[in-house]
Amino acid sequence: MAECAMNTLAVLSNKLIQQLAVIYADIELTIPLESLAQRLIGEMRIDEQCTPPPPFSNHWSERDVVMITYGDSLLRDNEKPLLTLQHFADNYLQDHINSIHILPFFPYSSDDGFSVIDYSSVNESLGDWQDIKAIATKKRLMSDLVINHCSSRSLWFDNFIKGAGQGHDYFFTASPQNDLSQVVRPRTSPLLRATDTAHGEQYVWCTFSHDQVDLDFRNPEVLSQFVKIIRQYLDNGVRIFRMDAVAFLWKVVGSSSINLPQTHEVVRLLRTLIEHAQPDAVIITETNIPNTQNLTYFGNANEAHCIYNFSLPPLLINSLITGNCLYLKRWLMSMPPAQDGTTYFNFIASHDGIGLRPAEGLLSDQEISLLINTMKNFGGAISWRTSESGEQKAYEMNISLFDALQGTVNGPDKWGMQRFICAHSIMLGLEGIPGIYIHSLLGTRNDYEKLKNTHHNRSINRHRWDYQRLETQLADDTSPHAQVFKHMLTLIDIRTAQKAFHPNATQFTLHLGLNLFGFWRQSQDRRQSIFCISNITDEPLALPIGELNLIITEQWQDLISGKVFDDLTQAIELAPYQTVWISNKVS
């Protein structure tokens, strides 16, 4: 047994050496690759007890639903917000939702947490590691690994300025004279930040903002530090790692500096280490980029376990405000089934805006312009980026999902609630793991006060609830917040009981015209089928049941309404924005 275990470590070491050789092929290192591999194994505390993870293993099921929240989305007087969050999870989420993504909970200087000052501690205003651990004992915990950049107010960057100490050589610099014209980034601010240091003026690479200084993974010390950080997060209960902005991790002057081969290899190497240390841990890559590029982060089931389905939000919203599902259906048909060991992470709202880059090549310029104008009419804001050609292009739409779906391209109407629930009915049925932003769960509206105070467009959808007020709202059956919450939990409970909604269950797109959007799911044992059909218009529609080719020897029932379909020659009458989940097997 000992010899077998030692062989496992030897195989792991050899694999890491091969991966490091790819990452640092063009870099002259001062440490041998063999020594670096052993160092990383030690920092991850992988010992001879480890077992190689079986390939193509699914660490998820239909039971998995993730709530996305900031650590301080819920506030109660004289209580640390992480404790308030735990109260909410205990009292309201209970067994409905089994996973929580707490957005960056570390000390930070800007971007609501994504400019990390110290990766090793919890922001004191939120709580401490014990509070994080307490949540992780009851819910599967997802945390951000803000891996591309850190805060300009971090100790590491202070030492960069001083020219000595840990961090003095952790940051990527370039010259204004370099050809940086091909660099792809999601912001309009200057790429380089002039910084006075002990070694003279240096120009630090800043993909996002000048407070978010990019790390230099050409230095293996940076990789080593993040392996230590990952180990600490595992020790404190994190089981899902969201790799923030990872597409920008490796930079090469004169290139686009996005999605470079070294970036993919770093993700593979970190997965190798993580799955040997904690076999059920999951990596999700956050790559808000065009769909075809996003798909590459699956690798061959050896890179990200999950990728964000970034094209879903703009395409689904476009369908619901136009009453036309052509683009959504065309995209769904083009999506490859995720092989075992990988799956999609589906969402339609998040702490960020509704990204438009993932709609490039899927929606025409005219469709995108109509979408942007409609969101502006509904009170949303637009964030911009500088394109490769130097022009200003819309990057994302900043608006709460509830407000985004308050009407159609013709303006607000009376169907906002139904349209909002329809969007989630579609998302919850799709192949993949659903992630639901807390403000969608609660039907939160645009926060104009926070937008006014911060002058940051994304603040419009980052409301902080007074917990006592929220409890009052949720206790009032006439409150829109209570109605949304009840609808959402009902749908979630139905979803999590169906084998055909396993994230890797079969999915086929149905052809029901442009006004009905539908797809078919089948459980992996082929015993359960669910036909998910939504009326995406503001008019009632009829669907002849015969078009679905239901097996006549089985009994079919809508899981949502409970309606039984005894006569398969009749038509289903669908109200505006109604969804049916027609199944032959009711759990």
Image: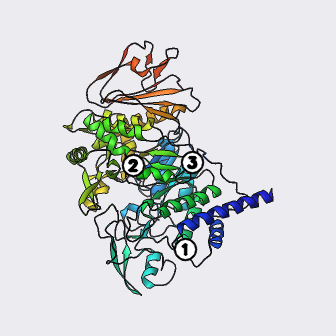
Q: Residue at x 52, y 17 (%)?
A: 554
Viewer-proximal residue, 12 or 25? Answer: 25
The residue where tag 3 is placed is 138
Local packing at callout 3 (Cα closer than 10 Å; few below 14, some 14-19, many 20+) is: some
Residue 543, placed above or below residue 304: above
Q: Amino acid at mark 3?
A: Lys
In the rendered view of the protein, which quadrant contains the N terminus? bottom right
> x, y (%) of residue 273?
61, 60
Viewer-proximal residue, 338 or 402? Answer: 338
Would you say the residues marked 1 and 2 are in contact, meaning their CB atoms lie under 8 Å apart? no
Give the alpha-carbon distance from disc 1 to disc 2, as whole Å. Answer: 32 Å
**Label 2: which secondary element:** helix
Which sits earlier in the primary sequence, circle 1 or circle 2? 1
**Label 3: which secondary element:** helix
The residue where tag 1 is placed is 221
Residue 19, placed above or below residue 200: above
Which sits earlier in the primary sequence, circle 1 or circle 3? 3
In the rendered view of the protein, which quadrant contains the C terminus? top right
Using the image, tell me which numbered label, if any, was put on residue 423. none
Residue 468, placed above or below residue 244: above
Viewer-proximal residue, 4 or 399? Answer: 4
> x, y (%) of residue 10?
71, 63
Which sits earlier in the primary sequence, circle 2 or circle 3? 3
> x, y (%) of residue 256?
37, 64
Q: Amino acid at mark 1?
A: Glu
Q: Residue at x 57, y 33 (%)?
A: 524
Q: Nearer the viewer, mark 2 or mark 3?
A: 2
> x, y (%) of residue 223?
54, 69
Using the image, tell me which numbered label, if any, was put on residue 291. 2
Report whether residue 86 is seen.
no
Q: Amino acid at mark 2?
A: Asn
User: Which of the 4 image quarters holds residue 427?
Assistant: top left
